[in-house]
């Protein structure tokens, strides 16, 4: 850990620090760790919170309260007098692995609520994924308080933990509070982006020319451009759903038409960058993922589309829109022509500010799935000689529905992966707080040895070796039984192989 300067100004802004001090939530490095073993620690009892979001082991007489703060869930365990407290908070935030950024966000609110708040001994890991600091403040009812606070970020999941006592009692009570904190378990499904991300109620909307229909949240407005093109957005023009396209002239024509875009045929991600940045709609476009959809191209070919080359891609990206950082998802189609004089780009796009996008995903999915082109309108349009447009629209209507289902499957897979990642971080945090390390012996076929403050134990046979050089501080990994250097379990791959229990 390395120290950094400007501690109070730099750290007081932990995202849920206000909630941690006001309502009880603090946040751990990772996620609440599982209890270390099937039985409660001596003198403690098992408590399942009222909403079944957490399990915790606490001393007799203590209470455990579960609650929610915006996009966060928390548990606060305290003694009967409310003097001692251990708190865990888990939430979502757009910090993407930056615990310092998470810490910075909450500073102003906490500073306004507790003007005498003091922060000391602040440290941050080199990768900025974890922050720890001590602090003190005056509570209106409880008087002067002191605490230790941890912040950890894994992708968009922020976790914080806090242990707190009356001023001058932290060192004396720390062992008990850390034991409580280390024995908090987040039940599977207790925190899920879906908890705070439910689809909004939708109402049906039909374009004025009858070319398409879709559903959008109540209170949204729609700019109708005809021929299946529109932009639907919320009242603040922050979240949106749009369908549209553009005709692009090929440079080989050698002409410049005012207002027309001239460029060689491009795949969708290049076309999207060109059209959005050249028209000034966005800036600082950065792709997170570009996913080719060759299956869609093949399906369109089987459906009879032969007018020229086709490329289909899913795009996930961030960009600046009207001075605000936003995130977007686009299903883009690039249609070439055999003569090569021009080509067409069409898209279906949803977007929102980065801090709202994840919560809007269920709504966006429902909107994409509801999108339909009107078949009678298409028949009339075809009669006017635009066959290629109809082919595109027919394919788009079915593809959007299928793509929405794939979005849901992708979200579920991402959630499952996040749960596994959270369990591993729980394991790391528990080891750090409790002062223990696991080692794996290759000579014994993957047997795991565990060191703690007392010594080293073979977790398979129960054999143990106490005192130096076998305790957590002095043990270097030499197998007590065989002449080998054991491997520390310090990676997720080793944890998955030797520690993780199947669900």
Image (spheres, rainbow, N blue to C red):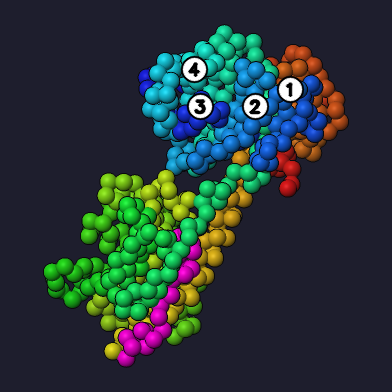
187 drawn magenta: no
In the image, which residues are magenta? 363-383
Q: Which mark is residue 77?
A: 2
Q: Residue at x 43, y 80 (%)?
A: 394
User: What whole-number distance in Å separates the C-alpha atoms at marks 2 and 3?
Assistant: 14 Å
Element type at marker 4? Answer: loop
Q: Residue at x 45, y 60 (%)?
A: 364
Q: CA distance from mark 1 to mark 4?
A: 24 Å
| Marker disc for residue 441 | none
In the depicted structure, whether residue 9 falls above or below residue 259:
above
The residue where tag 1 is placed is: 61
Which of discs 2 and 1 lies nearer the camera? The answer is 1
* Residue 140 circle label: 4
Q: Position of residue 248 (x, y in %)?
A: 25, 71
Image quarter of residue 75: top right
Residue 495 relative to residue 40: left or right = left
Q: Are marks 4 and 2 in contact (CB under 8 Å)?
A: no
Q: Earlier in the sequence, mark 3 or mark 1?
A: 3
Q: Residue furthest top?
A: 168
N-term mark: 2 or 3: 3
Give the spatial CA distance, label 4 vs label 2: 20 Å
Q: Could you tell me how far apart the alpha carbons at marks 3 and 1 are, in whole angstroms?
A: 23 Å
Among the two numbered marks 4 and 2 on one chain, the one whose residue lies closer to the N terminus: 2
Which circle, 3 or 4, is nearer the viewer?
A: 4
Label ID, residue 22: 3
Q: Identify whether 279 is placed above or below 386.
A: above
Nearer to us in this view, 70 or 35 = 70
Dot placed on the residue nearer the N-terminal end, 1 or 4: 1
* Residue extending farthest front: 141
């Amino acid at each position: 850990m390395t120290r950094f300067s400007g501690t109070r100004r730099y750290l007081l802004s932990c995202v849920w620090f206000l909630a941690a001090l006001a309502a009880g939530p603090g946040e751990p490095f990772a996620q609440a760790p599982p209890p270390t073993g099937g039985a409660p620690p001596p003198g403690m009892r098992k408590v399942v919170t009222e909403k079944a979001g957490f399990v915790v082991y606490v001393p007799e007489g203590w209470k455990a309260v579960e609650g929610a703060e915006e996009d966060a869930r928390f548990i606060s365990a305290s003694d009967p007098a409310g003097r001692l407290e251990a708190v865990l908070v888990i939430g979502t935030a757009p910090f993407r692995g930056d615990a310092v950024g998470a810490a910075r966000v909450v500073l102003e609110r906490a500073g306004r609520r507790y003007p005498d708040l003091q922060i000391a001994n602040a440290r941050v890991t080199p990768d900025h994924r974890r922050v720890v600091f001590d602090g003190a403040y005056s509570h209106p009812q409880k008087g002067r308080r002191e605490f230790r606070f941890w912040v950890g970020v894994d992708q968009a999941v922020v976790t914080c933990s806090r242990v707190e006592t009356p001023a001058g009692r932290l060192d004396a009570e720390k062992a008990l509070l850390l034991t409580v904190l280390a024995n908090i378990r987040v039940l599977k499904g207790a925190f899920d982006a879906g908890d705070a991300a439910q689809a909004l109620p939708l109402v049906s909307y039909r374009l004025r020319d009858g070319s398409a229909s879709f559903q959008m949240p109540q209170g949204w407005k729609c700019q109708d451009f005809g021929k299946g093109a529109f932009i639907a957005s919320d009242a603040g023009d922050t979240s949106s759903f749009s369908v549209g396209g553009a005709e692009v002239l090929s440079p080989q024509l050698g002409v410049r038409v005012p207002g027309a875009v001239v460029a060689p045929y491009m795949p969708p991600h290049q076309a999207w960058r060109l059209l959005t940045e050249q028209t000034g709609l966005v800036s600082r476009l950065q792709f997170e993922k570009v996913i080719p959809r060759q299956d869609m191209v093949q399906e369109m070919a089987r459906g009879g589309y032969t007018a020229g080359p086709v490329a289909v891609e899913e795009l996930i990206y961030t960009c600046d829109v009207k001075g605000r950082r936003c995130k977007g998802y686009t299903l883009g189609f690039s249609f070439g022509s055999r003569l090569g004089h021009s080509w067409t780009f069409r898209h279906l796009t949803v977007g929102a500010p980065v801090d709202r996008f994840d919560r809007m995903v269920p709504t966006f999915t429902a909107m994409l799935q509801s999108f339909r082109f009107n078949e009678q309108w298409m028949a009339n349009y075809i009669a006017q000689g635009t066959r290629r447009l109809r082919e595109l629209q027919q394919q788009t209507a079915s593809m959007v529905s299928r793509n929405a289902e794939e979005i849901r499957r992708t979200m579920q897979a991402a959630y499952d992966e996040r749960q596994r990642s959270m369990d591993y971080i729980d394991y790391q945090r528990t080891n750090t707080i409790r002062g223990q390390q696991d080692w794996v012996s290759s000579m014994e076929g993957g047997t795991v040895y565990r060191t703690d403050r007392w010594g080293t134990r073979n977790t398979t046979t129960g054999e143990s070796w106490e005192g130096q050089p076998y305790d957590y501080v002095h043990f270097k990994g030499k197998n007590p039984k065989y002449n080998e250097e054991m491997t520390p379990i310090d990676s997720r791959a080793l944890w998955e192989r030797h520690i993780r229990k199947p669900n």
